[in-house]
Image (cartoon, helix red, strand yellow):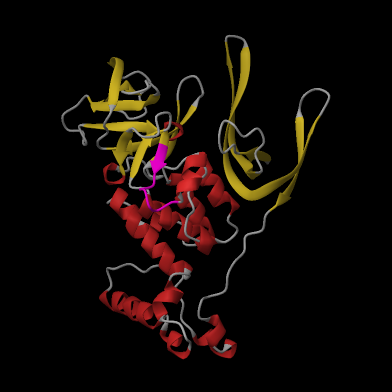
Amino acid sequence: TFDSVTFSNAHEREAHFGTTAEIYAYREEQEYGVETVKVKAIGRQRFKVLEIRTQSDGIQQAKVQILPERVLPPTMSAVQLQSLSRCHVIPSSKPSWQDRAIRQWWQKYQKRKFHCASLTSWPPWLYSLYDAETLMERVKRQLHEWDENLKDESLPSNPVDFSYRVAACLPIDDALRIQLLKIGSAVQRLRCELDIMNKCTSLCCKQCQDTEITTKNEIFSLSLCGPMAAYVNPHGYIHETLTVYKASNLSLSGRPSTEHSWFPGYDWTIAQCRVCGSHMGWKFTATRKELSPPKFWGLTRSALLPRIPEGDGDGEDSQRGRSPLLCL
């Protein structure tokens, strides 16, 4: 296990938050007399950097604090007798819709879930805003708009794991990802992610900031991991790539090539921003007629900047280049 820190922008010299990463696969390679080790790792725990020391050999060491994950009680727990909790039937996961009886039971369960809200001063809809299960269903509906073939069974049923899975596939920049990393509760993280998905309607060139490249409606999924997946080129460089049907304000550079294509049956062409010339990703075109879609774009997350429409964020913060204020 090792630690990984994330820089929110190029001007920040020290990262204050990161994650521990567990290596689950590795491979040793040797090319031109140079030995390299390639690893696959998965994030495990969030941490906050407390102190950084630089050794005489230039290697940095850090003292970190592992951040706990705060699990909030059910929204109705304050008005329900704990002695009757064992009588409540709570499904471990969303049931299959093939059985009509199960489907009807699930609908009744959802309606009665906040029935006890009538004993309080607050309406049921207010409690649903902070209910992990309800938030997960709302996020899933958004994900299904990106990927019609997405199966709920492929997503984590635990709210904590689900919130991190969604954070990994959102097409957001490092600044917004650090905001999500700072949040210590799955409920707050899901609310923030849902707010991002609702507000960020388009993606712009990170260098130009005002040049729109694509919109949220054009996002689709070609990977089991969702619309955002990590791909490695022959030089070992990792590209977090977002797949979209259509893109604008891009120009192509070079000739199409099928060499080392990440998507079999498609050739790729380098795509650059038409305004500033920054590398944005690639255009993929099918080499066989039976493939669908016939063409699409793969855009790198590092080159994209999510745009929040004016009026949703604070003007002063926008001028200073701060991250937008999101709903928690």
Q: Measuring 77% from the left and 35% from the top, which residue is drawn there?
A: 61
- Residue 137 vs 19, above or below: the answer is below
Can you give x and y, in whole percent of width and height, for residue 262 in the image? 37, 28
Residue 49 falls in which quadrant of the image?
top right
Q: Quadrant of the N terminus?
A: top right
Can you give x and y, in whole percent of width and height, for residue 39 in the image? 58, 32
- Residue 76 vs 253, above or below: the answer is below
Q: Measuring 37% from the left and 20% from the top, which residue is drawn there?
A: 277
State whether residue 321 appears in this view: no
Q: Measuring 33% from the left and 79% from the top, which residue is drawn there?
A: 105
Residue 212 falls in which quadrant of the image?
top left
Q: Nearer the viewer, residue 100 or 245?
A: 245
Q: Measuring 25% from the left and 37% from the top, which residue is drawn there?
A: 245
- Residue 323 vs 153, above or below: the answer is above
State whether residue 178 appears in this view: yes
Residue farthest along the right direction in this orientation: 56
Is 163 colored magenta in this rendering? Answer: no
Chief secondary structure of the magenta portion = loop
Which range is magenta? Answer: 305-313
Can you give x and y, in whole percent of width and height, for residue 224 in the image? 38, 44
Q: Is residue 226 left or right of residue 88?
A: left
Can you give x and y, in whole percent of width and height, for residue 48 in the image? 69, 48
